[in-house]
Amino acid sequence: MPPVGTREPHTATAARTCAAILSLLLPHRRAAAPHTPAPVEAFPEQLAQLAEFVEAGEPIVFTLPGFPCKSPSPAKVLGHLPDEGERLSLRFLDDLCAAVERVYPPGARMVICSDGHVFGDLIQVPDQHIDAYADELAAMITRERLDHLSVFDLRDVLGDLPHDDKRARVHARYAPTVEELRAEVRTDEATRALYCGITRFLTEDTTGFEGTRSALQRDCRRRAYGVIQRSRAWGALIADHHPRSVRLSIHPQRPGTAKFGIRLLEAGDAWTTPWHSAVLRRSDGGWELMRRADAERLGRLVLRDGRPSHFVAR
């Protein structure tokens, strides 16, 4: 038996609890290499983040940057407000926190760090649409009684300042330089994949561009660097405001990195999110994210509270 006053028994118990909590996340991991085995031991960063809460007996705080706004492409989404894709995703996250509580009684809560205003100008979505999306997201959490969830956005940090001023302040304080990112894209595979993925999304989502296809691609490559700069800045700001948290990401992540990639709903593409797509209820009862144009071809539209919500397979 260890000497009185040592922490070995507590630490051993905490380690088992952290492993049990992480095991709840693993089936939903959004992975850069999804077919590579990744046991609990492959995630020391997340185990350490969990241990800060478990060893103190405190509720776990998850932070998840995402849920920014709907894509501006009518070929992808049903409109600019949250729909069934967001509702199902929020319910999943709330259920995940409830599952944590069953193995760790202090429980867990999830802070949805809605980042639309951070790069709204770069993705060419009006700020009023981003406000409406965030407000409806918060209302959806209240209506659905998702008590483990809350929303955090730039309004919580910089109040009623003009949106351009907010973006400029966050960028100036936290963003890396474009030169730093260009070097990282050249040398780091994960950053290069992120850059290519964002460039593809921007190219697909841009409407009304009057130049050539090559000019559009150049513009989207430039804006992609800006989106990554702002995303990094938002991550740093979140770390300042939520310094103790288990950091989640909607982007694919490798084991051993500081963030854990989380998959919200089933989709054919690892980069697909509810805000870049519509949701189809398949004939087997499952839900799948896909482009609106594809879901429209496969199913019939369903309204919820008078608004387009999702599709049901014919």
Image: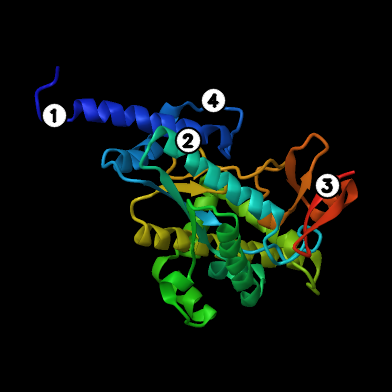
Mark found first going from the N terminus, 2 or 4: 4
Please give the residue where the numbered disc 3 appears in the rendered image: 312
**Which disc number belongs to residue 255?**
2
Mark found first going from the N terminus, 4 or 3: 4
Of badges 4 and 1, the one in the foreground is 1
Q: Are marks 4 and 3 in contact (CB under 8 Å)?
A: no
**Vertically, is 183 above or below 43?**
below
| SS label for mark 4 | loop
**Vertically, is 24 above or below 150?**
above
**Vertically, is 114 above or below 107?**
below
| SS label for mark 1 | loop
Q: Are marks 2 and 4 in contact (CB under 8 Å)?
A: no
* Quarter of the image where one finds residue 8: top left
Q: Residue at x 83, y 37 (%)?
A: 283
Position in image of residue 227 (x %, y %): 57, 63
In this view of the protein, can residue 310 be seen by the observer? yes
Amino acid identity at mark 3: Val
Q: Nearer the viewer, residue 64 or 269?
A: 64
Q: Are marks 2 and 1 in contact (CB under 8 Å)?
A: no
In this view of the protein, can residue 256 be seen by the observer? no
Tell me the CA gap for discs 4 and 1: 35 Å
Mark found first going from the N terminus, 4 or 1: 1
Tell me the CA gap for discs 2 and 4: 10 Å
Please give the residue where the numbered disc 4 appears in the rendered image: 37
Position in image of residue 9 (x %, y %): 22, 25
